Amino acid sequence: RQRVPPGTPKFLYEQAKSFSSLSRNQFFHCLLITLLNFIGVVWFAQSLEPGGILADTLGGFGSSLKKWLIPILWFYARLFLVIPFARLVYILASNKLRQQRNEKRENLARILGKNLAVVGT
């Protein structure tokens, strides 16, 4: 969490958004699951290819899996990677804009504070 700079009223300061409320350990577990999911889909798709581990065993059923199930699993695995990445990009851009607005407000508060001190004397 960022701290409000001295001299800036709290109500003028926007806190930065965080990517997740998960602990670091929980976040790495989710990342591990995401990577294992992606690797698993790659392995499964390759094992259904001709000469793959499951190609001979499953025969025609394997080609049906390759035709219908693998595209769904690929979509899911990619989506599992793309959504958090898109959120990360959004959070970083949003926090950059918040930081710029906070700096403008801080400067404005400093200028107004000086002007009020001059008027008050």
Image (cartoon, rainbow, N blue to C red):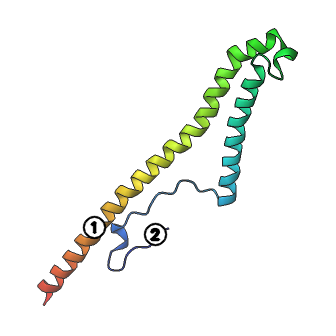
| Residue beneath the point at 69% across and 14% down | 67
Q: Residues within 10 Å of mark 1 (few under 14, many from 20)?
A: some
Q: Residue furthest top?
A: 60
- Structural distance between the alpha carbons of marks 2 and 1: 15 Å
User: On the picture, is 100 further left or further right than 112?
Assistant: right
User: On the picture, is 61 further left or further right than 115?
Assistant: right
Quadrant of the rendered image containing residue 61 = top right
Q: Residues within 10 Å of mark 2 (few under 14, many from 20)?
A: few
| Residue beneath the point at 57% across and 54% down | 20
Where 84 falls versus 10 (above or below)? above
Q: Residue furthest right?
A: 57
- The residue singled out by tag 1 in the image is 105
At mark 2, the secondary structure is: loop
| Residue beneath the point at 36% across and 59% down | 98
- The residue singled out by tag 2 in the image is 2
Number of dots carrying numbers: 2
Q: x, y percentage for residue 19?
A: 53, 53
Foreground of the two, 46 or 37: 46
What's the mark number on residue 93? none
Q: Quadrant of the C terminus?
A: bottom left
Q: x, y percentage for residue 79?
A: 58, 34
Foreground of the two, 106 or 72: 72
At mark 1, the secondary structure is: helix
The mark that comes first in sequence, 2 or 1, is 2
Quadrant of the rendered image containing residue 114 = bottom left
Q: x, y percentage for residue 10?
A: 37, 72
